[in-house]
Image (cartoon, helix red, strand yellow):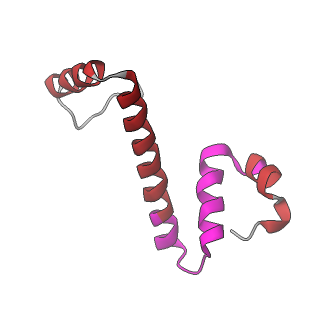
């Protein structure tokens, strides 16, 4: 099983999902990928808010970005002195 194999999906369902994606126009694939990426960020932010209800919106945003890009990069882009998460 590869690291990206979904354990809760049957082989038949996985084959149909791949076939469905292949039938999409390139622009539609991009739209779906962007929506999924946004969904993951919203879910990550909701999790951070649940674990840290005292955090500001900026702190939650920094935590989500740090989990994606790494804290050192986010500190360089947003400024380490602004870190409050």
Queried whether the magenta region covers residue 29, the answer comes back as no
- Quarter of the picture containing the N terminus is top left
Query: Which quadrant of the structure image shows residue 9?
Result: top left
Residue 65 location (% of width, % of height): 63, 52
- Quarter of the picture containing the C terminus is bottom right
Q: Which contiguous range is marked in magenta?
A: 46-72
> Which residue is nearer to you in this view: 34 or 9?
34
* Left or right side of 13 for 56: right
Queried whether the magenta region covers residue 47, the answer comes back as yes
Residue 38 location (% of width, % of height): 46, 49
Whether residue 4 is visible, yes or no, is no
Residue 80 location (% of width, % of height): 83, 60
The residue positioned farthest toward the bottom in the image shown: 54
User: What is the magenta segment's predominant secondary structure?
Assistant: helix
> Which residue is nearer to you in this view: 35 or 7?
35
Whether residue 24 is visible, yes or no, is yes
């Amino acid at each position: 099983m590869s690291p990206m194999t979904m354990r809760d999906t049957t082989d038949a369902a996985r084959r149909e999902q791949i076939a469905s994606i292949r039938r999409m126009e390139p622009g539609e694939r991009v739209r779906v990928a962007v929506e999924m990426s946004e969904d993951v960020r919203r879910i990550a932010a909701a999790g951070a808010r649940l674990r840290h209800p005292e955090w500001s919106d900026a702190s939650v945003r920094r935590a989500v970005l740090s989990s994606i890009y790494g804290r050192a990069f986010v500190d360089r882009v947003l400024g380490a002195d602004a870190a409050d998460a």
